[in-house]
Image (cartoon, rainbow, N blue to C red):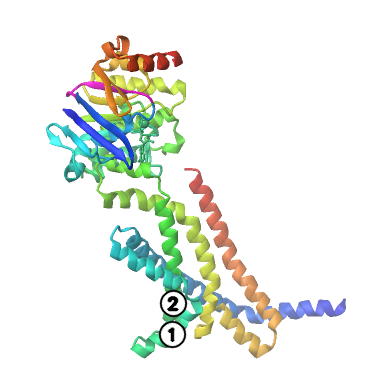
Amino acid sequence: MITLEKVAKSFGDLQVLKDISFTVARGEVACLIGPSGSGKSTALRCINGLEVYDGGVIQVDGQRVGAENLPSIRRRIAMVFQRFNLFPHRTVIENIIEGPVFSLGKPVAEAREMGMDLLEKVEMADKATSYPAELSGGQQQRVGIARALAMQPEAILFDEPTSALDPERVGEVLNVMRELASDGMTMIVVTHEMRFARDVADKAIFMADGYVVESGPAVEVLTRPQQERTRQFLDRILALD
Amino acid sequence: MGSEVTAFSDFLHDTIIFLPVLLKGLGVTILLTGCSLVFSLVLGLGWALMTLSGNAWLSAISKTVVNVIRGIPIIVQLFYVYFVLPEIGVQLAPFAAGAFGLGLAYSAYQAENFRGGFEAVDRQLVEAGRSLGMSESTIFRRIIFPLGLRTALPSFGNTTVMMLKDSSIASTITIAELTRAGQLLAIATFKNGTVYTLIALLYLMASLPLAAGVRAMERKLSRR
Ligand SMILES: Nc1ncnc2c1ncn2[C@@H]1O[C@H](COP(=O)(O)OP(=O)(O)O)[C@@H](O)[C@H]1O
Ligand SMILES: [Mg+2]
């Protein structure tokens, strides 16, 4: 349902994405891995138009991602951020209903009811009236995921959702993501959590220097990489684990 | 020793007589500050929105206006409103002229307060709004405006304290606010020391709680 074809993107003189192509089918979980600075965030941000790409084509269900249809694309593809990016002036439940009410135009009561169900799902219902600053990182990220789900998206993009968390908080967020994956949500996840990638992802895409070096079934790429670059990267990551 | 006691009891005696007049003046000062504050905020928000609109013309106009206003002494702006506007047919009562002139003069600083607040809003929150499919105007209304206002609250408070003090400039266009009420008293009684001490104390009494309020707001906001 999400297709990138020869996507290129530069910031001034710096060409960050040179030739990125991959496809993620409906219901698939794809992990985007690669060294820091290789353009993973940029690729993700191009998919929902937070960055404007300048070459190739990105399609969502056959619809080209471009300036003319950004709101509609963004309402169908949600995003979860490394630093959560919850609205600090709104309570947890207000954060959840912000998109449904002020972007989709849902009635507040209906949005609130659905929001509370989602908070149950991520086990944050008891914090519905707390402010983000009163929550731990793991709790904030679970709210971030609930906020994304509240848009009833067709796919969710995760940009290093656990990188900003204390190690003991990583598990609770990955568990929520595991559950989403088993519910059949289409997900693209930028992550350094290799165990999660191996266990949950259908597909792994290894990026370096603006190219897709290697992609395929997650187990294949992560356990029997074909490319030397991939092998080196995985050795380094796994040595840290 | 004896003469000092007499001087102090004289001061108390005069204070009891002067205070009602000066308090009335303080009332006018507070009303004038309030009116010009509201006017400066409305106008300042307008300038800030024009500057940030992304429209080159609007932005150039508001930047020019703000620079012109900031480059002219407040007292000259007041005289302009009070003495020059009538020549082109706009006759304002002294109080209205004072509120308008002070509000106009301070709108330039309020515009900077607003702009500073809006620009300090975390870009990542704006992106969070975009990723929810919000329009740019909804993002402004729901994210940038409330968060920017919060950041700018201390600046608004400080500007209000300055406006309270600068409202004394309105004494020059016959508004019977605290400074002018005091001037008239001093001229009539020759008790300069008593009168101006009382005026100073009254300004302090009005501005210190305001400053304390600003600090309380800052503390409250920093907790979230
Ligand atoms: N808005 C931007 N302006 C300029 N350079 C950027 C911008 N965003 C990212 N970059 C640069 O693009 C490169 C890739 O960044 P990024 O996509 O964040 O990589 P990754 O997520 O893989 O670590 C980095 O060198 C980064 O400094
Ligand atoms: Mg990144």
As drawn, which residue projects farthest toward the front?
A13
* Front residue of this view, candidates B210 and A66: A66
- Identify the disc placed on residue B101: 2
- Identify the disc placed on residue B82: 1
The boundaries of the magenta stretch are A24-35
Query: The residue tagged with tag 1: helix, strand or loop?
Result: helix
Residue B127: x and y in percent read: 32, 42
Q: Are marks 2 and 1 in contact (CB under 8 Å)?
A: yes
- Identify the disc placed on residue B65: none
Amino acid type of disc 1? Tyr
Task: Specify whether residue B35 is in view.
Answer: no
* Front residue of this view, candidates A39 and A163: A39
Q: Is residue A235 left or right of residue A54?
A: right
Quarter of the image where the C terminus of chain A is located: top left
* Location of residue A142 with respect to B97 vertically, above or below: above
Ligand 1's quadrant is top left
Residue B88 inside the magenta-drawn segment: no
